[in-house]
Amino acid sequence: MTTFRELLGRRVLVSDGAMGTMLQAHDPSLDDFDGHDGCNEVLNVTRPDIVRGVHDAYFAVGVDCVETNTFGANLAALAEYAIADRVFELSVAGARLARESADGWSRGDGRPRFVLGSMGPGTK
């Protein structure tokens, strides 16, 4: 399999766009957020279908890479929702969903797809 670095040496790799706005376009309910309104990372476990659908939508239009839905999966951001203890769980779930989507698309046509870990600074 061609590696990420090898491909970067040959051509521009295209990454996905905004994860948050794509998730919000699905109009998730407060139940989908498990009572943590606006905490997109919770959707990794409560609505993996939505998160996987966002990854699939980006791959369907030809991107090479998707970012994990983990921008706010850090202690400071999740502490605002009183769920800082779930950083690992939500991060692993987000990475797994992105990897599953990438692998599915790669198997389909043999073209490698990549996952980029997203780590945001939080809201402060």
Image: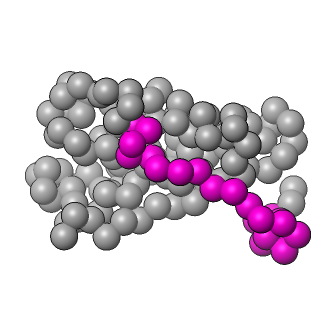
Q: How is the image coloured?
A: one colour
- Does the stretch in magenta take in 62? no
In the visual, does 34 lie left or right of 16? left
Residue depicted at x 53% and y 30%? 53
Q: Where is residue 122? Give x, y as percent.
A: 27, 65
Q: Quadrant of residue 115?
A: bottom right
In the visual, does 37 lie left or right of 106?
A: left
Q: Position of residue 89 (x, y in %)?
A: 35, 49
Q: Residue at x 79, y 50 (%)?
A: 112
Does 78 sit left or right of 68 as displayed? left
Q: Quadrant of residue 74?
A: bottom left
Q: Is residue 13 magenta?
A: yes
Quarter occupied by the N terminus? bottom right
Which residues fall within the magenta stretch?
3-23
Q: Is residue 54 visible?
A: yes
Q: Position of residue 37 (x, y in %)?
A: 18, 38
Q: How many marks?
A: 0
For image coordinates 61% across by 46% down, the residue present is: 99
Q: Nearer the viewer, residue 97 or 14?
A: 14
In the picture, measured across the screen, residue 78 lies left or right of residue 3, that is left
Q: Residue at x 11, y 52 (%)?
A: 82
Q: Is residue 67 above or below residue 28?
A: below
Q: Position of residue 54 (x, y in %)?
A: 52, 36
* Residue 45 visible in the snapshot: no
- Give the quarter of the figure containing the C terminus: bottom left
Q: In the image, is residue 6 above or below residue 68?
A: below
